[in-house]
Amino acid sequence: MSEPPASGQHRNDARLLDVVVVGGGQAGLAMAWHLQRQGLAFVVLEAGPEVGQVWRSRWDSLKLFTPAQYDALPGMPFPAPDDTYPTKDPVADYLRAYVAAFNLPVRLNARVTSLTRSNEGFEVGTADQTWRARQVVVATGPFQVPFVPPPAAKLDASVTQLHSGDYRNPQALPGGRALVVGGGNSGFQIAEELAATRQVDLSIATRYPMLPQRLAGRDLFWWLTRLGLLRVTVESGPGRRMSRRDFVIGTNRRRLEGKGVRFRPRLVDAEGRTVRFADHSLLEDVGVVVWATGYRPDHGWIQVPGVVREGQVVHRRGVAEVPGLYFLGLSWQHTRGSALLGFVQEDAAYLADRIQQGAAARDSGIGQAAPEPRA
């Protein structure tokens, strides 16, 4: 992995690459594996100081809900026994080992600040360099900008507030009552962990279906793959219904109530150290609030007309309407597995074929392949 030039210097890379991949997480690395096998000239631009940094920065006790046999990128199995659930650091270590094993061209500390069209294809700008490429894959994933709802601004400065992306462990927080806001997997897991050391209230705006980790002696993902549910596409009727809500896996309300967690409805307002819920009940003297309220996309750096509409990228299975531009690793990009570590490779393989078609069309002098028509 090469390093960028010294801070303050800016230069243009003289080479015209076949592909620039923006993002060095699991989606970007899966794409890199395919591009390398195709013999294309490419680079992966990773914003962080090390491969796997996003994983390593998650909370200490985080475990995947996909067992190890479903956590591999193409060409390299995940180094853990089947039916075990990796924690965050082994996942980060695996991504680093993956880059080393295949000698993938990843540039660290290369946060992309602009993507524009050019006569040759695209220009991708970082703080100190501009890269030129015929095609670009945006693989920045679904977790970009932490979202915190407006009532947070009305809480007193004495209340410790943090997004779940900044949560590490109970010991890092001051003592006293804690409120966790958000009823997804992160909210349930953090609330359960905090409940071992303090009173915890969990505020839920949307109730998600809850699924056990194991059924009839088999992991949930064994059943989901055997039944074909992870291959249901977002364009299908069942896929459209499934994509509207997520699932809480491996825990449930009764389990948390047994550990003393008190459930609250949607948080609607706050003042000082008091919060108000949708049923008009109050919670007073709140000392800690963990906002497990998800993320919002940030595509402001994509300066290509027609690609982003109302804050969302326009694509069909990752293929943008602008020839040569692709997206990978988005939630429900094609199926439920599109943003999952061990399942993103299917979308990566599909887009790699499209990229190769574009390269072949260019070499033959007939131009790039057009994107598929939108449904």
Image: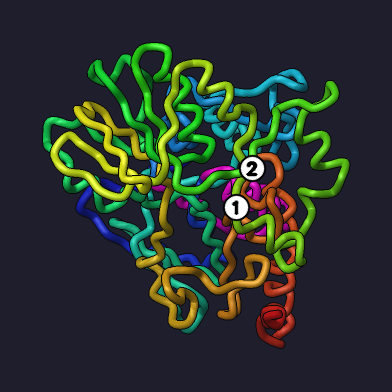
Label 2 CA crowd tier, 10 Å (few <14, some 14–19, many 20+):
few
In the displayed structure, 134 sits above or below 146; it is below
Name the residue tied to disc 2.
209
Quarter of the image for the C terminus: give it.
Answer: bottom right
Q: Residue furthest right?
A: 226
Q: How far separated are the C-alphas under marks 2 and 1? A: 8 Å
Instruction: In this rendered view, identify the residue nearer to me: 274 or 20.
Output: 274
Q: Are marks 2 and 1 in contact (CB under 8 Å)?
A: yes
Query: Which residue is pictured at 50% across the width and 31% down the height?
Result: 188
Along the horizontal axis of the image, is 258 left or right of 342?
left
Label 1 CA crowd tier, 10 Å (few <14, some 14–19, many 20+):
few
Query: Which residue is pictured at 17% across the width and 46% down the height?
Result: 154
Instruction: In this rendered view, identify the residue nearer to me: 16 or 186.
Output: 186
Instruction: In this rendered view, identify the residue nearer to me: 273 or 326.
Output: 273
Residue type at mark 2? Answer: Pro
Question: Which span is picked out in magenta?
Answer: 25-47
Query: Which residue is pictured at 72% across the width and 60% down the height?
Result: 239
Name the residue tied to disc 1.
245
Secondary-structure class at tag 2: loop
Q: Residue furthest top?
A: 197
- Is residue 310 visible to the viewer in this orientation of the structure? yes
Q: Residue furthest bottom?
A: 366
